[in-house]
Amino acid sequence: RKEVEQDPGPFNVPEGATVAFNCTYSNSASQSFFWYRQDCRKEPKLLMSVYSSGNEDGRFTAQLNRASQYISLLIRDSKLSDSATYLCVVLTGTGGFKTIFGAGTRLFVKA
Amino acid sequence: NAGVTQTPKFQVLKTGQSMTLQCAQDMNHNSMYWYRQDPGMGLRLIYYSASEGTTDKGEVPNGYNVSRLNKREFSLRLESAAPSQTSVYFCASSEDKGAPYTEAFFGQGTRLTVV
């Protein structure tokens, strides 16, 4: 079993739709969680951190469920420009750290 | 703002050839990383360096060596390239030094093909 698993998609949604991605992680001692965005043939860039209490940034909402060991990303009112691959990132470790990237979920937003 | 700069952007090697991927960051970050990205596999950590003069193995270090030349530069060397090393390589850096992970900034990637 992979340490971080994501549904690879692709998710095909119309503009204006709401779409949600989930990501599960296997190590219960994982400490920090993030969502990165990667456009086609580009480098990943931080979208948002995921806090225990949940957090929102405009149309994007991230949630963490430690009991079930998953994080989620909700995108409301999807835009064409949201088309990208969304990477779940989990940080695990004590003393040092181990950063684990999920394989990513592809999103296509259609006009 | 240059951020993280990787060279080259593209490279084709023959099996058995060697090469070094260069990476430099101008953000005064402590930590630097090398990842490879393959279809369906996500980003996998090859090596990382938590500070100047230190390096540690990541998830997939076999076939690679690294050198943290100074705080700015972190190079990745393939001594004898193999087709299995065909991939997109990303260098990244972050501020953290023994602290909770902070945002990682990535270079634009190197597309390497080994034939």
Image (cartoon, coloured by chain):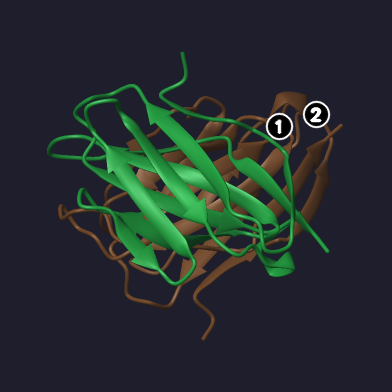
Chain colours: A green, B brown
- Residue wearing tag 1: B81
Q: Are marks 1 and 2 in contact (CB under 8 Å)?
A: yes
Relative depth, front residue between A71 and B98: A71
Residue displayed at 38% across by 77% down: B27
Residue displayed at 27% across by 51% down: B50
Label ID, residue B96: none
Using a 10 Å C-alpha cutoff, classify the residue at mark 1 as few (fewer than 14 neighbours), some (14 to 19) or many (20 or more).
many
The extreme left residue here reads: A95
SS of the residue under disc 2: loop
Residue B108 visible = yes
Residue displayed at 27% across by 53% down: A54
Mark 1 residue type: Ala
Using a 10 Å C-alpha cutoff, classify the residue at mark 2 as few (fewer than 14 neighbours), some (14 to 19) or many (20 or more).
some
Residue B98 position, x and y percent, is 15, 52
- Residue wearing tag 2: B15
For the residues labelled 1 and 2, the Cα–Cα distance comes to: 5 Å
Relative to residue A5, is residue A105 drawn left or right?
right
Residue B57 position, x and y percent, is 37, 33
Relative to residue A100, is residue B16 drawn left or right?
right
Relative depth, front residue between B20 and B88: B88
Residue A85 position, x and y percent, is 64, 49
The extreme bottom residue here reads: B1
Relative to residue A73, is residue A31 drawn left or right?
left
Residue B104 visible = no
